[in-house]
Image (tube, grey):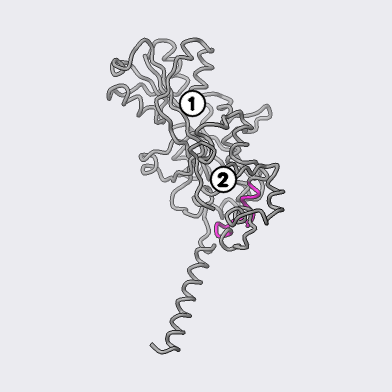
Amino acid sequence: MGAAALGAATMGMSGVARAGNAYAYGLLISETLKTVKKRGKLLVGIGNIYQYYPTGYPPYFYKDANGQWIGFEPDLGRCIATAVMGSKDSVEIVGSQLWDTRFTDLANGMFDVLFAQATWTLARDLNFNDDFGPVYEVTPVTFWVRNANPASWSTLRWAAPSGTTGADYAYTLGGGVAPMLLNATDAAYAYMEGGVDAFITDEVDTLAFLEIMGGSTEAQNYQTYKTDPLAIVVRENDSKWHEIVNWVGYALIQAAAWGWTQGNIESIKNNPAMLNDSQKRFLGLSGEVSFMTSLGLNQDWAYQVIKQNGNYLELRAKWGLSTTGPNTPEGLGGVLFTPVW
């Protein structure tokens, strides 16, 4: 090949590469993102309140004295609103119609993102038109067994909340016998009144169960079966939106791992000489404008998320949730991770 031909070929390849980069850096815009921006607010789905408690599930989601949704999960939704809209207040919190319908409600467009104690399972990932991730909490699954030892569990009458992974676990613990499926409150009462011998649920329902049982000795007699990963959920077939939601979740965890807080992140941003490339990229200081804005967001979206809301551990502390143990970044002894920025 002659020099002229080689040069032309090289320029052509370079042009293709530039076109490819341009495509990767923002021409593919999320349809959900466009809808949210046109609407002017993010619709955040949470669990169903009427099936359990009329006021919600403190501290995860509940209504304050003014009827406003507050709690750990609404605040996570506000973090996404901050990244997308620039303000944590550009959000509307929407309750699921029923606990069993939270995934189909999302798939049908009732909200843009779902925070509803959703355990990430293969069946849910494949059977609903939704995508999962990242994990924002690992939660214990607990159970009560009355007057029995493990050898006799398969002979017991089990109850579990419908629409939850607890139903699968009760089936396994019960030796392949289908459990009685009720909402959490009715299952708790069934156990208290002797209608069933055993009851299994996750930590949020455990807190409700303890309240229903009034702190009795029987209420405290529960065991941990395993832990479940609770994940953010979005609709399928919008990969850019999935990326946005993923990286907002990762930003909260990464800021906590670095020790960046709502109170110190501005001063950190104002001293870029002390930062590595990943940290500069997080703060929108790297100069890689096309790289960060390829999500369709502002260059400093991650900075704004922490500045307006705080990091992951700050949000947990705000609502009285544990800031030690598994629900901390892996560098701090927990199991929550973030990809490299």
Amino acid marked by disc 1: Glu
Q: Position of residue 247 (x, y in %)?
A: 54, 49
Describe residue 315's horizontal placement relative to residue 102 as left or right. Answer: right
Total marks shown come to 2
Query: Helix, strand or loop at disc 1?
Result: helix
Residue range corresponding to the magenta coloring: 293-305
Query: Helix, strand or loop at disc 2?
Result: helix
Sequence order check: which comes first, mark 2 or mark 1?
1
Describe residue 83's horizontal placement relative to residue 335 as left or right. Answer: right
| Residue 31 vertical position relative to residue 156 in the rendered view, above or below | below
- Which residue is at the front of the view, 189 or 252? 252
Residue 296 colored magenta?
Answer: yes
Residue 333 colored magenta?
Answer: no
Q: Quadrant of residue 320?
A: top right
In the picture, the disc for residue 254 is 2
For label 1, the crowd category at 10 Å Cα-Cα, with few meaning under 14, some 14 to 19 and many 20 or more, is some
Residue drawn at point x = 34 percent, y = 12 percent: 148
Residue drawn at point x = 61 percent, y = 46 percent: 81
Q: Position of residue 161 (x, y in %)?
A: 42, 25
What residue does disc 1 label?
203
In the picture, the disc for residue 44 is none
